[in-house]
Amino acid sequence: SPSDPDLVERARAAKEKLGDKVFVLGHHYQRDEVIQFADVTGDSFKLARDAAARPEAEYIVFCGVHFMAESADILTSGDQKVVLPDLAAGCSMADMATAEQVAECWDVLTEAGIAEQVVPVSYMNSSADIKAFTGRHGGTICTSSNAERALEWAFEQGEKVLFLPDQHLGRNTAVRDMGMSLDDCVVYNPHKPNGGLSTDELRAAKMILWRGHCSVHGRFSLESVDDVRARIPGVNVLVHPECRHEVVAAADYVGSTEYIIKALEAAPAGSKWAIGTELNLVRRLANRFAPEGKEIVFLDRTVCFCSTMNRIDLPHLVWALESLAEGNLVNRIEVDEETEAFAKLALERMLALP
Ligand code: 13P
Ligand code: SF4
């Protein structure tokens, strides 16, 4: 939808007044009306790196979700302030693993006598607490663009991996990219005693997958893939690795948001694509590449936007920028020092992956 010209002008004026003091980061799932004001756009990995590369900006306005703003705060210097334009922009997947649940899980692994063999690997889409747990126990963070390298690294450090909180990214990477079998994976359910697993199951597993998922990507199904193939002969199916295993197995290409964009940039004119990821991004890509003769459709028309990514809209961005321009620091995201120290360890292990 076209953005309100008055709000566009206000955002522009506030940004101009702030000048180099502000740096605006925008995740690829953000609305067009917001993305137009981003100084850089990217996937989770790129945005984490870009946030750390702007030491001169006093304010980092993060147009994305809460865990991304936390990660930016962890990776930037103490004087820099990270602002999330709407504090309600969380992530349902990140909420599926709490610090208490993960501590309890570690007790279960300790009881089973395997904790010493286990290396935690946590997806970026997790709270700072979970990242700190990961750092404390010798593990690393990963994103959808480096999950395979993170797992390879982890299996050099230990025999088993506890993968948090997205079971699908964990399973897809282990099975599709690393040749493990589905039987090497078990799912730990934090709502059941002992995670719903026997000691024997825990001891036999190579990948212990946390029972979390993305509420958006989890809705694409094998039927979505079959339907689009029937509807559009010759279509290339390209999905995000947060999709369920059977969807990823049926797709032609799998990758992060940045990968999806690059794949479409490289696609020949006349090619047809069905994309299984968040709708704001798919629409933007469909519009961008239509003039080049690339036909891009959303993998399943019954799936909707990520509601929390969409919380950041132009009115919230204008409010945040105007507040900062008037000297009012609003919606700051600040991780406490102890959590930050351990979470940073885990994030830096990721940034150092080969
Ligand atoms: P990437 O941009 O890293 O692929 O992440 C997707 C996502 O779900 C972020 O919330
Ligand atoms: Fe979380 Fe999924 Fe939304 Fe990403 S798309 S922010 S993983 S709910």
Image (spheres, rainbow, N blue to C red):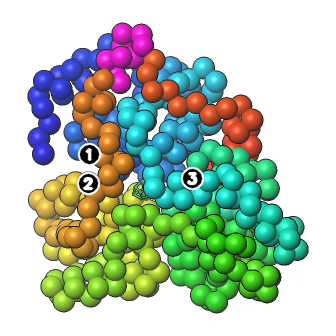
Closer to the chain start, of discs 1 and 3, is 1
Q: Position of residue 14 (x, y in %)?
A: 29, 17
Residue 92 horizontal/vertical position (percent): 45, 55
Residue at mark 1: 31
Residue type at mark 1? Answer: Arg
Left or right? Give the position of 111 relative to 291: right
Residue 214's quadrant in the figure?
bottom left
Residue indicated by mark 3: 126
Q: Which residues are magenta?
A: 320-328
Kind of residue indicated by mark 3: Ser
The residue that disc 2 covers is 280
Helix, strand or loop at label 3? It is loop
Q: Are marks 2 and 1 in contact (CB under 8 Å)?
A: yes
Q: Dominant secondary structure of the magenta stretch?
A: helix
Q: Secondary structure at mark 2?
A: helix
**Is 309 situated above or below 51?**
below
- Please provide percent x and percent y for residue 268: 23, 71
Q: Is mark 2 within 8 Å of ligand 2?
A: no
The residue nearer to you, when weighing 187 against 47, is: 187
Instruction: Tell me the quarter of the image containing the N terminus.
Output: top left
Q: Quadrant of residue 313?
A: top left
**Residue 58 inside the magenta-drawn segment:** no
